Image (cartoon, grey):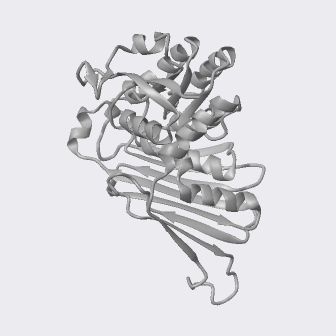
Amino acid sequence: MSYKIGIIGYGVMGKTRRTAIEEIKKGTVLAISEPNVGAEVDGIPNVSHDEIINHPDLDVVIVCTPNFLNKELTIRALNAGKHVFCEKPPAFTAADILEIKEVEQRSGKTLMYGFNHRHHDSVLHMKRLIDSGEYGKVLWLRGRYGKSVTKDYFNQWRAKKELSGGGILMDQGIHMLDLFLFLSGDYDVVKAEVSNLYWHMDVEDNAFVILKDSKTGKVASLHSTMSQWRHLFSLEIFLEKGYMVLNGLITSSMSYGEETLSVAKNRSTAPAATWKDEVVTKYVNNNSWRYEMDHFFDAIDNNQPIVYGNSDDALKLMTIIDKVYEQKDF
């Protein structure tokens, strides 16, 4: 089936989603809604948010707006009988997600959230290896996700709590937390230090988060920062019988460096500190946008649940984020 699609928010992400849709050839964008462009873009009419949501010919609404609009637009589009794909964060709190889930259930429509990092080839390979059991159980994870921002950040909506819902944790760290859940399961103990020592905004510029699963004892450590002074992505997973280390992430600017995955079996006997046993894979293409849109439209086609990025995933994630922000002291 070829779906008729409306995109609300036509900035970087809206354009990225449109490109992916055109590449997979599973739908046509019939309308966009973006206040910062003209009456049409490439022949596609630019209309109001209301017109997208209530458009009688549209099957799907894709939400690519500033964070504070995500919950409202998702609920309105579901109530209007549209399938919805919404960028992260899904909302500001776990309570918000519970409201959305009620509407989702009543609507009978498909809802998916844009946790794009799950769809990188490197991450999917890690997931397959972990699920295979070949490397045993996950013992611990460490994730670092950082970038440098400039003073013009103060003028952006991301720097205003009422528009963003939070700082670097809601912006970047949410992706790393989602990968923790995706690759290793849930966590019920959350300890955090959240600070704004450098930028002094009403949102955090650093978040240090320690997670623990009290049933298995596995622990995960996250540092999400906007005072890294360079872009950095690093995810390390250590298991009973080996490890996986992902450094770098393919983006359009390549500011996070090459996406390189190193995998090795456990070397607990001497000489332990050698690297010759590692299998190193460098990823040169970012297929994640297409994979993600494919997953969304395939679920609609086959009337099947979303596996990667559903509302249950969103609830688990925002429950953790709630617990982190409860420990914020500024």
Residue 319 in view (yes/no): no
Residue 55 in view (yes/no): yes
Q: Quadrant of the C terminus?
A: top left
> Which residue occupies the foreground of this view, 92 or 251?
251
Q: Eyeballing the image, is 240 above or below 40?
A: below
Picture quadrant of residue 314: top right
Q: Residue at x 65, y 52 (%)?
A: 183
Left or right: residue 98 compared with residue 234 = right
> Which residue occupies the foreground of this view, 318 or 124?
124
State the image coordinates of residue 210 (x, y, percent, origin top left): 58, 51
State the image coordinates of residue 144 (x, y, percent, origin top left): 47, 56
Q: Residue at x 50, y 10 (%)?
A: 56
Q: Residue at x 44, y 63 (%)?
A: 284
Q: Quadrant of the N terminus?
A: top right
Q: Eyeballing the image, is 275 above or below 31?
A: below
Left or right: residue 37 compared with residue 266 = left
Q: Residue at x 62, y 60 (%)?
A: 126
State the image coordinates of residue 247 (x, y, percent, origin top left): 47, 64
Q: Eyeballing the image, is 135 above or below 107?
A: below
